[in-house]
Amino acid sequence: MTTVPQPRHPSQRVAYAFFVAAAILFLLQVLFGLLIAAQYVWPTLLMNELPFNVGRATHLNLLTFWSLLGLMGATYYLVPDETDSELASVPLAYVQLGVMLLAGVGALVSLWFFGQSRGKPFTEAAMPWPWVIALGAVLFLVNVGATIVRARRWTAITVVLFGGMTGLSLLYLINLGTSANLAVDYYWWWWLIHLWVEGTWELVAAAIMAYLLITLTGVERARMHRWLYVEVSLVLFTGIIGIGHHYYWIGTPRYWLLWGALFSAFEPIPIALMAWDAFASMKHRRVEPTNRVAWYWLGGSAIGHLLGAGVWGFAMTLPQINKWTHGTQLTASHGHFAFYGAFAMLVLAAVYTILPRLRGVERVPERRGLQAFWLMTAGMLAMVTAFTIAGVVQVYLNRMLGLDFMTVRTQYVGFWIFWVWLFGLSLFLPGCALYVRDFFALTRKASLRPLPS
Amino acid sequence: MTEKSLRSIFIVGTVLFLGVLVVMSRDSVSQLVSGRTPALTSDVAAGKRVWQGKNCNDCHTILGIGGYYAPDLTKVMERRDAVWLASWLADPQAVNPATTMPNQRLAAADVTALVSFFQWVGGINTNDWPPQPRLSLGGGADTASGAVVFQQKGCSACHRVAGKGPVGPGPDLTRIGGTPYDALPNTPEFLAKWLENPQAQKPGTVMPRIPLIPAERDALVRYLTSLK
């Protein structure tokens, strides 16, 4: 089997528009991250013009937004390939992107200029924008679902991918409601947050990972399909009740201390299996990689997912430890590492695999892409290290010795967030900017060659 | 195993575990509303709307969830009294000109509602979270542990000692043991009474009443009188 250097189905090209939006929003997300890190160190910076809470809400929302757009773009490319058919409707895909972008812009404008928020992290978007986002999700599901149903090709990859996308859309509906009881509000909010990142998003990511591994390494499809089912089964069988690690201290009954600990202790196992599977596939490849940048992002994602989600998550998942670490910078260290490894790196692997094919080229200039990979990855590792030290310092001084929060923040933790900011500014931001530049350069260079119609 | 049987395990298992989660969630939420959280009032609900509408949670944390940028407010009413908190919420800069908490320009009713909300949150049964610090003051409390209490209780957020800390709103305490401040006595007896309830000693002071156990109060007094 050899790789196909151009899309087999013209409708796959809608992926490109999603990737453009994802690349720009990614850079914007990083800029807002740098701003709030700077505010942590110099708290009066833009204190009244763009306060920390607005910057943080923007940083979080852009993260989920560009990751989702990237995963959706990859899905639009992958589903025609898997079903060997054209997408049900190309215009609908563009309409859906427009709806999503409208919702995103609307949510940010209402946050920035009108101070509107629904007040829970990640889900700040004020009404009516959550309804518009939900509409975008429905349009996406209809389009992808119709494609699969029409082609009658329920491969392991399409089953898991569509299952994950349906699940994450259904879970989003939770965000349309609220409860006057803060503890109940947060109870259901965790269904959304946890069952997204440790459930449905994992399904989508695992399916895309399997697709990319088959595409890039030429490993046997049937074996990959079986592995995919084993992995996602273990993800959900540990992760669904593993939600309990968020129910230790928010007012929920004490039995969650046992159930949460028991199930989430096993959550790293499927992640380790995925990493092992990825590396086994890459080692026993039947085709040589023609695109080292995609190859690096793919391998990097396997490792980053294992370390960020598996190891960093496990480190604080048991209640005996979580009692001290809950709600500190350690959570921030885990969040950054896990999102980068599990989702950001995977989306970039998909972009670098798919983009050249969309443009009908097989080999792409690799230098800038690899530089971006190393700058971002080194930057993230350095930031995570600084976040982790900040978290340990905070846990020890604030929680164990009981020093006042603000004393600890201004005199001890701020120093380590300064390093987060500096590594972000000197490594991650240049890496991200280089990626965006490379993205458009690849588009330009490649577009000189016309696509076969 | 064949792909088909693995798919069946995936689907059946997922449905099964989701079913378990649904059953557990029904029980959890019913326990939450009947006993594990205090009864809701319209004031508490209004306070929550202010809390969420102003996006407080992306700076502060509550129940350990949030921005990690400003203090966790789950048990804030154990640290601050309602009168002080209300004046703080109404205008943080009037209480502490150096604070980086933005003035949210809250209406008086919003302030009252927020205080009710924090009192309500304080009553949530959080399985003893956040944990008590491991530092023990029992027995040999001396000036050193008084200095720790000074840091623990956030005194250093308003008072300056030996060149460290902000200039105001509280007085510089570098020499409080030798030089009385504001014509108030600096005897150990008076300082103890002052810490018990500043308003009773000087009505209108911006100094909040910080809840202290007797050992903490005595350690603080020993520390303050040692500053000369």
Image (tube, rainbow, N blue to C red):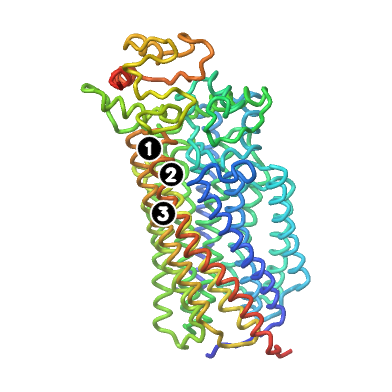
What kind of residue is marked 1? Asn
Whole-angstrom CA distance, mark 3 to mark 1, is 21 Å
Mark 3 belongs to which subunit? A
Residues flagged by tags 2 and 1 on a common chain: yes
Tags 2 and 1 touching, CB below 8 Å: yes
Earlier along the polypeptide chain: callout 3 or callout 1? 3
Mark 2 belongs to which subunit? A
Q: Which mark is residue A398?
A: 1
What kind of residue is marked 2? Thr
Residue A72 image point, x, y percent = 64, 67
Earlier along the polypeptide chain: callout 3 or callout 2? 3
Whole-angstrom CA distance, mark 3 to mark 2, is 13 Å
Q: Which mark is residue A353?
A: none
Residue B152 image point, x, y percent = 37, 30
Q: Quadrant of the N terminus of chain B?
A: bottom left
Residue B9 image point, x, y percent = 49, 64
Residue matched to label 3: A313
